[in-house]
Image (spheres, rainbow, N blue to C red):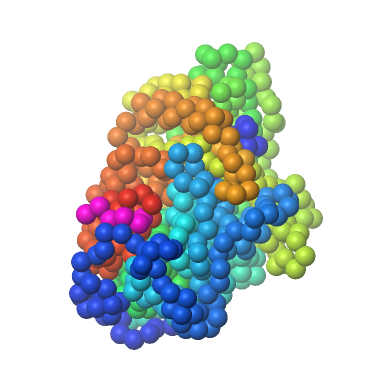
């Protein structure tokens, strides 16, 4: 989940050879003709598998082929608002849809995979029978990539093993050993942080929301609260195990099939195959991690503009370094809401950083009213993902999974709860280049930000731009498939809104409300783009209706990604919206266009 707020919605098994295989031989093993069909099979069609064929697949995966249909009666609201419960159901996704785009529809069957061989069997079956194939781990795809009707789902939730390495060297590599963690495709970040940080005293760069899936976030590039300090999550990837469209299990890294390995570092999840395990480098855990909170309300439009201008000056001077991340939001009510995190400095040092800006606000009560007084809180780094610590010290910050039999230590951040099951009205993002903070760009940025905030809350995510990171972090993040604009961006501007959960068969969305919210978001998006008209977007958090999505999401990397896609998946078995190769298919992924 992205960490946005809006006022109405108060985050080595190696099988066989791993050498690259020519596309023709790969497709022959999958029993597919080299010319792809124009349409995939659907239930009731002549090409849909027979029951004996489904039974054979079930036998091959040890009985782990399960019906994926949704029950007619919804569970209690308390369960539907629990992201762990949602993630535990084969027929649910963490978003329930997007107005005018998609609805959360369950598959016909799912392979509840427990191993790479289960995944490989499902891939071969889908290729052989020309099925729509869907992959779900955490189920957080805003663009609907983790669900599709009339499909076969590969559900990796049970593949959640975590292994800590003191000294890891990727297969076939001559690099020096480094501390690392290997995680299964079904792992979620909260559990990985607990294993790596709370229990082992190390840090792994991952997502901000505790229930986001590791595999999807890494393949999308991936940001956490401390990306300016540790880089893109994908930049820490050392090795991946992946099942490709030919049904083979491959172990890839910087030496073995390096193009495919590179594509997995930000080229998009569900596109090049099904990742079954990832190994990530771990880092020294910051001694202190903390948060800063401050909310100010301007008394007039002009005072609001001056407030934003002062903040931009402050951000240029004090926030572009590895210590700071998370977000600052401007709202239609003329509020500036600061919800930032820090690492590597203590609470008093963080407070001193903000002293000048806070002091100026306090000295001008006629223009700026303090709604939430400033505070900075630092805690031991080892306790930051420790549910027990939060329960004892800051219980209001988390929501524990209190279901009977829930796994110990599972929780979600209180601020992420309103996104569970959300039906999206709109979601846009835009990289903001560092030059906008300088004198030559400041006025343009402040004009655009204040104009956009008249329509909808506009949040600057400072952790989702790497300007201010160290040369080492920038170099590692440059060696990923992400749009290189992220390297020079001081933040990612996100504007989003949504309505209550609306799963088909249980409830219908208020489309009038959603369309009105969408109009507000789009007006705000148009206004903020005046500051950076040609800027790109983050593919995991971009507009479903983004027209120039290839350039916006990948920039100059698009052609290389397209070449890799055609080599490893020439028939387009793996298709997600705005994914590499999706331009050859209709949005539903069933009908080929070219």
**Front-lying residue, 424 or 434:** 424
Total labels drawn: 0
- Say which residue appears at 46% left-offset and 80% top-offset: 52
**Image check: 262 left or right of 388?**
left
The picture places residue 555, in percent across and down from the top left corner, at 27, 47
* Outermost bottom residue: 16
The picture places residue 466, in percent across and down from the top left corner, at 41, 47
- Say which residue appears at 36% left-offset and 26% top-offset: 530
**Front-lying residue, 518 or 185:** 518
Q: Is residue 47 above or below residue 18?
A: above
Answer yes or no: is residue 384 visible.
Answer: no
Task: State the extent of the magenta-drawn residues as a range.
Answer: 589-594
- Say which residue appears at 41% left-offset and 72% top-offset: 49
* Outermost right residue: 392
Q: Is residue 94 above or below residue 273?
A: above
Q: Quadrant of the C terminus?
A: bottom left
The answer to which image quadrant residue 196 occupies is: bottom right
**Front-lying residue, 256 or 59:** 59
**Front-lying residue, 318 or 569:** 569
The answer to which image quadrant residue 434 occupies is: top left
The picture places residue 580, in percent across and down from the top left corner, at 31, 55
The picture places residue 65, in percent across and down from the top left corner, at 53, 75
- Say which residue appears at 62% left-offset and 40% top-offset: 500
The answer to which image quadrant residue 467 occupies is: top left
Is residue 593 rendered magenta in the image?
A: yes
Magenta stretch: dominant secondary structure: loop
Answer yes or no: is residue 296 visible.
Answer: yes
Q: Is residue 324 above or below residue 122?
A: above
Is residue 576 rendered magenta in the image?
A: no
């Amino acid at each position: 989940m992205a960490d946005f707020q809006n006022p109405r919605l108060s985050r080595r098994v190696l099988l066989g050879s791993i050498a690259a295989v020519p596309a023709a031989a790969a497709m022959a093993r999958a029993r597919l003709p080299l010319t792809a069909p124009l349409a995939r099979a659907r239930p009731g069609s002549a090409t849909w598998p027979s029951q004996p064929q489904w039974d054979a697949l079930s036998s091959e995966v040890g009985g782990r082929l399960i019906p994926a249909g949704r029950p007619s009666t919804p569970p209690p609201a308390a369960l539907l608002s629990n992201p762990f419960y949602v993630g535990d159901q084969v027929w649910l996704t963490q978003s329930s849809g997007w107005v005018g785009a998609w609805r959360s529809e369950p598959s016909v069957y799912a392979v509840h995979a427990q191993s790479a061989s289960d995944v490989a069997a499902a891939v071969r079956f889908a290729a052989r029978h020309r099925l729509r194939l869907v992959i779900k781990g955490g189920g957080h795809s805003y663009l609907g990539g983790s669900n599709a009707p009339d499909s076969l789902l590969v559900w990796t939730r049970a593949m959640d093993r975590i292994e800590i390495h003191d000294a890891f060297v990727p297969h076939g590599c001559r690099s020096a050993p480094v501390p690392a963690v290997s995680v299964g495709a079904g792992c979620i970040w909260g559990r990985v942080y607990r294993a790596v940080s709370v229990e082992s005293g190390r840090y792994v760069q991952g997502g901000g929301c505790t229930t986001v899936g590791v595999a999807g976030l890494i393949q999308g590039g991936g940001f956490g609260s401390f990306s300016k300090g540790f880089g893109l999550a994908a930049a820490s990837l050392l090795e991946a195990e992946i099942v490709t469209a030919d049904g083979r299990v491959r172990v890839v890294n910087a030496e073995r099939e390096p193009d495919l390995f590179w594509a997995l570092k930000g080229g998009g999840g569900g596109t090049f195959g099904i990742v079954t395990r990832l190994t990530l480098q771990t880092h020294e855990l910051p001694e202190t991690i903390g948060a800063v909170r401050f909310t100010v309300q301007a008394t007039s439009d002009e005072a609001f503009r001056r407030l934003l201008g002062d903040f931009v000056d402050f951000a240029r001077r004090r926030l572009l370094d590895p210590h700071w991340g998370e977000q600052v939001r401007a709202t239609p009510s003329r509020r500036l809401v600061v919800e930032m995190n820090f690492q590597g400095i203590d609470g008093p040092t963080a407070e001193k950083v903000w002293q000048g800006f806070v002091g100026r606000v306090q000295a001008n009560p006629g223009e700026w009213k303090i709604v939430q007084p400033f505070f900075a809180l630092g805690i031991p780094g080892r306790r930051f993902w420790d549910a027990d610590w939060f329960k004892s010290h800051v219980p209001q910050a988390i929501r524990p999974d209190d279901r009977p039999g829930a796994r110990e230590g599972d929780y979600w951040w209180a601020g992420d709860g309103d996104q569970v099951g959300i039906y999206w009205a709109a979601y846009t993002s835009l990289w903001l280049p560092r030059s906008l903070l300088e004198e030559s760009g400041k006025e343009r940025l402040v004009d655009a930000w204040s104009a956009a905030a008249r329509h909808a809350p506009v949040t600057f995510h400072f952790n989702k731009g790497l300007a201010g990171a160290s040369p080492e972090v920038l170099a590692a993040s440059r060696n990923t498939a992400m749009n290189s604009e992220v390297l020079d961006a001081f933040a990612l501007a996100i504007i989003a809104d949504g309505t209550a959960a609306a799963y088909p068969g249980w409830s219908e969305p208020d489309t009038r409300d959603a369309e009105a919210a969408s109009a507000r978001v789009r007006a705000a998006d148009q206004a903020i783009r005046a500051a950076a008209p040609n800027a790109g977007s983050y593919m995991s958090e971009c507009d479903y209706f983004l027209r120039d999505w290839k350039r916006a999401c990948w920039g100059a990397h698009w052609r290389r990604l397209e070449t890799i896609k055609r080599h490893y998946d020439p028939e387009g078995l793996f298709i997600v919206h705005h994914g590499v190769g999706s331009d050859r298919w209709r949005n539903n992924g069933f009908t080929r266009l070219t």
